[in-house]
Image (cartoon, rainbow, N blue to C red):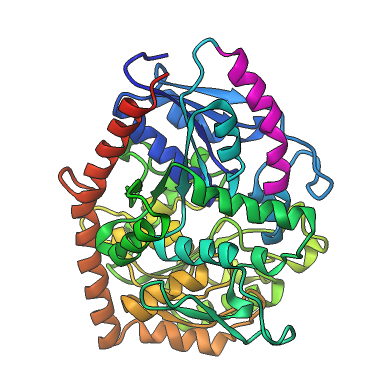
Amino acid sequence: MSKSGAHILVFPYPAQGHMLPLLDLTHHLATRGLTITILVTPKNLPILKPLLSTHPNSITTLVLPFPPHPAIPAGVENTVDLPAGGFRSMMSALSDLHDPILAWFRDHPSPPSAIISDMFLGWTHRLACQLSIRRYVFSPIGALAYSFTYSLWRDMPIRKNAGDDNEMVGFAEIPNSPVYPWWQISPVFRSYVRGDPISEFIRDVYLCNGSSYGLVLNTFDGLQGAHLDYLVKDLGHDRVWSIGPVLPPSDRVGPTERGGPSSIAPIEVISWLDTCRDHTVVYACFGSQAVLTNKQMEELCLGLEKSGVKFILSVKGATRGHDNKRDYGSIPLGFEDRVVGRGLVIKGWAPQVMILQRPAECRVRDRRDHGWNSTLESIVAGVPMLAWPMGADNYLNATLLVDQLDVAIRVCEGEETVLDSDSLARFLAETTSEKWKERRARAMALSKAALDAISEGGSPFNNLDSFAKHLSENCQP
């Protein structure tokens, strides 16, 4: 290991949308002289391959067996192989790594002097306290979503009418005071049952985040300055670093091992895009977690077909955790043959950053997924969006994109909603309108702000330097 900086343990949560940005942050910390150990379970180790090959002397791994859990099928170690509801089980299972980690620390001749772990691993704060070291929270979601979610678990709002899923929930002290109907807030929070051990454990995870020594967020001041200022005030300290958008190094953008296997090689996707005129392609993607029902998929494909637009459709099939796999993720019979030459269907992992970040100009016109990573990647690329919030932080991100920045429009809401094909075709037609050109111009202006921010001298670049310096100076053994 390199002895040039403090030794840090990095512990990602095994979900693609959480793991990849923390690994990208790890790359930036390694380039700033820190020595890092990354904790993973065996089946997540391949995701680290590009990072380990880039930093063979400063990054090593701690590979621990995945703890068995009754709600997680044997052999599953990442939420990409589980339905969206699998997050609760994964959070619970990983807490059983506490004792193996503690034993490893105590046996190590030169153990880490700080822990950086995902927000879903809040219990590592108590581990850090046992070891008399500091724990830093990594948030893969934006500052608005983090503020709202933390407030939920701290303040525990209760519906006046337990049967009213449309009752509004909000926190007046959060900038712009966003409110949401009960059915749109975190499903993990909605599943809370007072006194239930798993529910109380998950609440403690979030409360531990608030007690941890520092907070690192994948966002930037120019995008969410008011919410970052609010977090500093709410947490009662200024150890809040906004270091985003965290993007993969240019020499590591696009390899299939970054997120998983794909049915089409990245170079084939890019070659196809290069045959298309600028701003003529729709990229339809629902992230690494969501799986559409067959009915949703049927209407989506029919809408793309009716619209006449060129498109890339990223499809995720049913996971091992789905009870009725035949009801999810099926492409309608004959669809791919009917759209040959006009559309690409990618099954598995799509090289999203490569698709969005083409040289000179982006050929992708709009997108239909807006988890936080996708939100940031679209912002960097200057790509406006058609938004279909389904869960998790999607509704909070839609507030930012649609209501505050006006670089997106909502096409529908809800994970069980079926957007009919005629409505989708109309929304796609709107992307050729003058109003959409204005939206694209705002997206391009936001892209410039994001690119300026992550360039040398920008606030996230400086914050990365500041965070690395803080760790080097304050987290020595």
Residue 197 position within the rendered picture, expressed as x and y whole percent measured from the top left: 78, 53
Residue extending furthest toward the top: 109
Which of the pair 151/412 is nearer the observer?
151
Q: State the count of labels.
A: 0
Residue 345, position in %: x, y? Answer: 54, 61
Quadrant assignment for the N terminus: top left
Above-or-below relation of 269 to 74 = below
- Nearest the viewer among 222 and 442 is 222
Give the farthest residue toward the left: 457
Residue 411 drawn above or below residue 27 = below
**Magenta region:** 91-108
Q: Nearer the viewer, residue 411 or 391?
A: 391
**On the image, which quarter does residue 294 sit in?**
bottom right
What residue lies at 30% left-to-right and 82% top-to-bottom?
436
Please give left or right for residue 213 compared with residue 85 in the image.
left
Does residue 263 appear in this view?
no
Q: Residue at x 62, y 86 (%)?
A: 167
Q: Is residue 106 magenta?
A: yes
Please name whichever residue, 63 or 345, is drawn nearer the observer in this view of the structure: 63
The residue sitting at 51% across, 18% down in the picture is: 111
Which image quadrant: the C terminus?
top left
Report which quarter residue 124 is drawn in: top right
In the displayed structure, would residue 410 be above or below residue 7? below
Residue 290 magenta: no
* 414 relative to 437 in the view: left or right: right
